[in-house]
Amino acid sequence: MMGFGLETLRYVPEESKDKVISDEDVLGALLKVFQALFLNDFNKQSEILTVLPESVKSKYQDLLAVEHQGVKLLENRHQQQSTFKPEEILYKTLGFSVAQATSSLISAGKGVFVTKGLVPKGAVVSMYPGTVYQKYEPIFFQSIGNPFIFRCLDGVLIDGNDKGISKVVYRSCNGRDRLGPLKMSDSTWLTSEIHNPLAVGQYVNNCSNDREANVCYQEFDVPAVFPVELKQYLPNIAYRYDKQSPLRCVVLVALRDIKQGEELFSNYYTIVS
């Protein structure tokens, strides 16, 4: 095993490699949430709108008009567009919200909980943020004492640590890939003001004898058709920019209905070599 020494490595167990939901379903869920986040932030998107084709721009303006009609019917007291918090957008869009809090497991530190609503079986419940390394790329220093490294089936690694050298690396890659006003990824998961409320997957704890897994990891490659204006919400970035290979993401999918107040538990494994 890759010379990691005594490291925790999260990975998708071989027997779970069949996907729980289709890539189309993952894409559909992400686009639904990201589009709602984009519309909610619409008044901050003016620079981005200037570089988008007219057809795309008018699509968002139409969606916004429809949304405002709905809001106006509900409440006439707000004259200006009121923006919602990202977790409220998640709840409005998918019917639930999630957040990190102190885990119910003793000595586990942080965990992730369903804070509102109900997560239906098969829903994308969070994303695993971080820098994506191909298996031949150097990750030695970032991996020392780092429990947030996730290994994909093909050896691709995702470093979901939001501190230290990992944080510095992600930020520099994020700056490098920017195209004018267009951001190719989201770095707010490194802060307390998270723009994408799904980007908390690195804090989901492993299942145990008395807490069985209610979510599982699923790999997802971002397709070429992914709207460029919505990439600002993707909490992953490639360590080396490569036009050829699609960006790898990992999502967490609900294995059953998960109720408000429940903590998420996954089926990753700890390998000690």
Image (cartoon, helix red, strand yellow):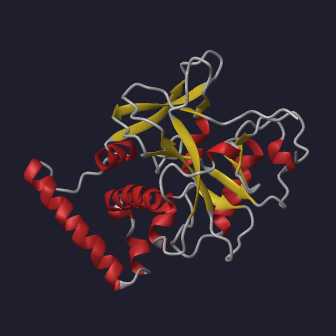
Q: Residue at x 45, y 65 (%)?
A: 230
Q: Residue at x 38, y 55 (%)?
A: 33
Q: Is residue 5 left or right of residue 256?
A: right
Q: Toward the viewer: 88 or 176?
A: 88
Q: Is residue 33 left or right of residue 79?
A: right
Q: Is residue 217 visible?
A: yes
Q: Is residue 10 left or right of residue 35?
A: right
> What count of labels does the image hold?
0
Q: Position of residue 231 (x, y in %)?
A: 51, 65
Q: Toward the viewer: 16 or 201?
A: 16
Q: Is residue 75 visible?
A: no
Q: Is residue 6 above or below residue 244?
A: above
Q: Toward the viewer: 230 or 180?
A: 230
Q: Residue at x 59, y 18 (%)?
A: 105
Q: Quadrant of the N terminus?
A: top right
Q: Toward the viewer: 77 or 69?
A: 69
Q: Position of residue 247 (x, y in %)?
A: 62, 65
Q: Quadrant of the C terminus?
A: top right
Q: Position of residue 73 (x, y in %)?
A: 8, 53
Q: Residue furthest bottom?
A: 54
Q: Position of residue 193 (x, y in %)?
A: 49, 44
